[in-house]
Image: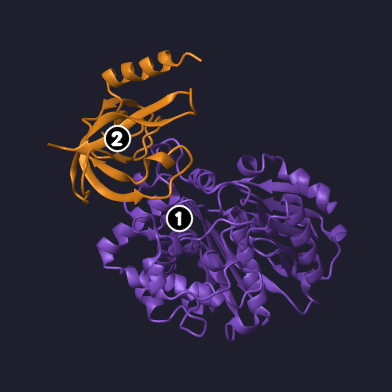
Chain colours: A purple, B orange
Amino acid sequence: MPLIANSLKGLNEMEGKNVFVIGAGSTKFGELWELGIRELISIAAANAAKSAGVGLNDVDSVFVANCFSGIVNSQLNINSICAEELGVANCVCVGGGDSSGAHAILQAANSVMSGKSRIAMAIGVEKTSDLSMSDIVGAVSCLADHEYEAYTGATLASLYGMITQKHMEKYGTTEAQIASVSVKSHSNAVNNEFAQFRFNVDADSVMKSPVVASPVRVLGSAAACDGCCAIIMCSGEAARKRRKKARLIGYGTGNDVVALHGREDITSFRALKDASRLALQDAGIGIQDISFAEVYDPFSIAEIISIEDLGISKAGEGGKFIENGFADIGGKCPINPSGGLKGCGHAFAANGVRQAMEAFIQLNGDAGARQVKNAKCALASCMSGTGSDAVVNIFSNE
Amino acid sequence: MNVSNVVMGWRRIRKGNFLLGSKCRKCSKLHFPAARLCKKCGSRELEDYRFKGTGKIYAYSEVRTASSGFEKHVPYTVAIIELDDGPKMTAQIVESGKVHVGMKVESCLRKYYVDGDSGIIHYWIKFRPVG
């Protein structure tokens, strides 16, 4: 049967709909040789609790997202690892693809809204640097359809390569436009203390960097890294007296078939379109009300298509939007002021939580040199694999 | 480990046609891989359908950084093939010079990779240019 956009109740239809982020914390993202999965969890959770001004023993439940610990770290049962590290008895593992961090936020929000938790934590953790390059590429390709895509030697980069090829063919998107994504992301990451790649790149070096899978190049791909990020959530009542907070005002989810070849059109992400429509509807706002967006950019074309599917630009004009500087901090609609996956590093299950952390930081005016002026409303969109699953969360400081 | 039975099995399936999918008896929608539930109308009445194995390239990418098991084969080309019967599938392109979108191809049985020094050789469909 065709996949139908979910009809879950939106935040505005639920009792006790006020749910707030009151703190966020992270490890640095990168190749963190000296830290294992336990240390990553401990550091991010402690930083988040400190930021919220609560103790870990005040946290009623933890929703921990992770993609690859079974493959990379030979460690399953991450929820128990998390419980042991944090001393919190109610830890739930949110599995799935690289959007699982964003799903963990929804679960934490639901737990708060139902009244089950006074304070809930969403945490995303990934430890991938213990693998060799080919093993990483193999593990990551498991996010696609393993039996009918990865089995044939198709890597995630090659699948996004085909998406890129089709987008260029259909809309005339250029190599220079694709390169402008990396130039912008790196430039933003320079000012993000948690980012892995804090240096500028120019368009020429992006376009001359080695091909990973045509036409995708090394500097157009986000590098797999280690990282952990956590946010603390509570109800509106509990957040009332707090100075630093961001309200989750809308969320939406969407799905598509896992294999790219099973889709009618590969130049747009149906799951993302569904998720963003539901999230905006839930928040009762239009896309023009968004101050900035954090989007999923494992490969540059994903950011370009995300801009189009979210309705920030017209279909086919996402590349031009970035090339013209409209996505810069200070542009019409800043995209990935944090540096995105490309600038921060791609820590899979941690991405969705890292995006929410960026929303929290920006909406409270704490982003320093990368601050988006008058940031009032932030949209975070996260996907899995080649867009088989999408989550859109919208935060506001009003 | 005696793997010959496994490989013989694959060859036998090839004789029966490896590209076996399903067709909905209600709405005639073709599925590859075979489906248990029609993705168009939801019917459970599906029958086996043998694909002709011919089609054209819908999109492709040349892989230079491969997954473990495929490192020795780089560069190789993976593509989405639009089968003449309808559905699309992903496979490698072989016996070809320059590949282009719209190129006509046909299926053939080829080695994909080997499980270690003495493991099973994995065969499956690849596509080559027609003529």
From the viewer's side, name the closer residue of A178 and B119.
B119
Question: Do we see residue A90 in this rendering?
Answer: no
Say which residue appears at 73% left-offset and 66% top-offset.
A25
- Give the image quarter of residue B53: top left
Mark 2 surroundings: few (<14), some (14-19) or many (≥20) residues within 10 A:
many
Q: Is residue A358 left or right of residue A231?
A: left
Give the residue at mark 1.
Answer: A271
From the viewer's side, name the closer residue of A78 and A369.
A369
Residue A53 shows which numbered tag?
none
Host chain of mark 1: A
| Callouts 1 and 2 close, C-beta under 8 Å | no
Looking at the rendered structure, the secondary structure element under dot 1 is: helix
Quarter of the image containing the C terminus of chain A? bottom right
Host chain of mark 2: B
The kind of residue tagged 2 is Lys
Residue B57 at x, y percent in the picture:
24, 46
Q: Work out how far the residue at label 1 is from the one at label 2, CA to CA, in angstroms.
A: 30 Å
Residue B126 shows which numbered tag?
2
- Above or below A213: residue B76: above
Say which residue appears at 68% left-offset and 81% top-offset.
A366
Mark 1 surroundings: few (<14), some (14-19) or many (≥20) residues within 10 A:
many
